[in-house]
Image: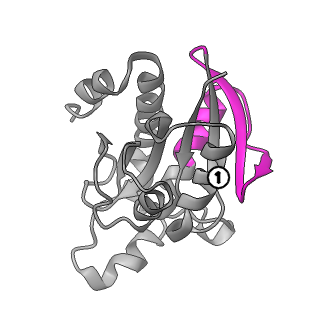
């Protein structure tokens, strides 16, 4: 049996639940919801659920090791279930994209994102597919931590559901039609 992993990056705990940094968790929760499942099992310092999506066996995973150490729980999961990095989709926040914009990339560097850097370090390569979900940039580098760990603004909340829906649909499209097709469709959307 060949598995795929869709992992959303974020930080555990109520304090972080509705912050920009946890947008990856929201994407994975939306996927679980679309499959009428809840992410309610624990293993390898992660919460997860096994799902059958578009005929494929998929683990929806939320690493609970905090953002900067996300790579190790995902790597343990992948190693245990013999999932290659090319069969892993990572959903995460991205300050280089305006809020609500979704962009799919494959085999790219971490771009300064510590969660992605941790994954590349854990696997020793960067061949995963990433769903970059825009959270905007605060303008000044000294406001970055406050920005990513801050709550959504009213304007952001008004488009958050659409944004999460787009990002989760991008994951579904990749499973069904492959990453190239998904990039052609989602990376051109305004």
Q: Is residue 159 left or right of residue 74?
A: left
Q: Position of residue 69 (x, y in %)?
A: 55, 68
Task: State the quadrant of the C terminus.
Answer: top left
View extreme (top): residue: 55
Q: Quadrant of residue 72?
A: bottom right
**Residue 59 is drawn in which quadrant?**
top right
Q: What residue is drawn where x is 58% and y is 52%?
A: 75
Image quadrant occupied by the N terminus: top right
Q: Nearer the viewer, residue 157 or 100?
A: 100
Q: Label 1: how many residues lie within 10 Å, few (<14), some (14-19) or many (20+)? A: some
> Which one is in front, 64 or 144?
64
Q: Is residue 1 above or below residue 163?
A: above
To which quarter of the image does residue 95 belong?
A: bottom left
Residue 48, image x and y in percent? 71, 44
Q: Which residues are magenta?
A: 26-55
Give the vertical position of 75 relative to 162 (above or below). below
Q: Position of residue 53 (x, y in %)?
A: 60, 21
Check disc 1 and report the residue beneath it.
76
Q: Secondary structure at mark 1?
A: helix
Would you say residue 46 sits in the magenta stretch? yes
Q: Please give the name of the residue rendered at 54% of the width and 49% of the height, measured from the top-left corner.
A: 8
Q: Is residue 52 magenta?
A: yes
* Residue 23 left/right relative to 130: right
């Amino acid at each position: 049996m060949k598995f795929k992993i869709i992992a959303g990056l974020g930080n555990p705990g109520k304090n972080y639940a509705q912050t920009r940094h946890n947008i990856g968790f929201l994407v994975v929760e939306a996927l679980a919801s679309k499959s009428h499942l809840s992410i309610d099992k624990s293993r390898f310092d992660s919460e997860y659920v096994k799902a059958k999506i578009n005929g494929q066996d998929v683990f929806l995973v939320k690493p609970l090791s905090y953002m900067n150490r996300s790579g190790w729980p995902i790597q343990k999961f992948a190693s245990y279930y013999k999932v290659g990095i090319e069969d892993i989709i990572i959903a995460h926040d991205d300050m280089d994209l305006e809020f609500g914009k979704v962009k799919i990339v494959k085999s790219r560097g971490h771009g300064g994102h510590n969660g992605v850097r941790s994954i590349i370090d854990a696997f020793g390569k960067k061949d995963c597919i990433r769903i970059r979900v825009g959270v905007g940039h605060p303008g000044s580098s000294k406001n970055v931590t406050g920005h990513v760990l801050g709550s959504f603004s009213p304007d952001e909340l008004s488009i958050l559901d659409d944004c999460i829906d787009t990002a989760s649909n991008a994951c579904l499209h990749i499973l069904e039609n492959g990453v190239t097709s998904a990039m052609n469709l989602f990376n051109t959307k305004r």
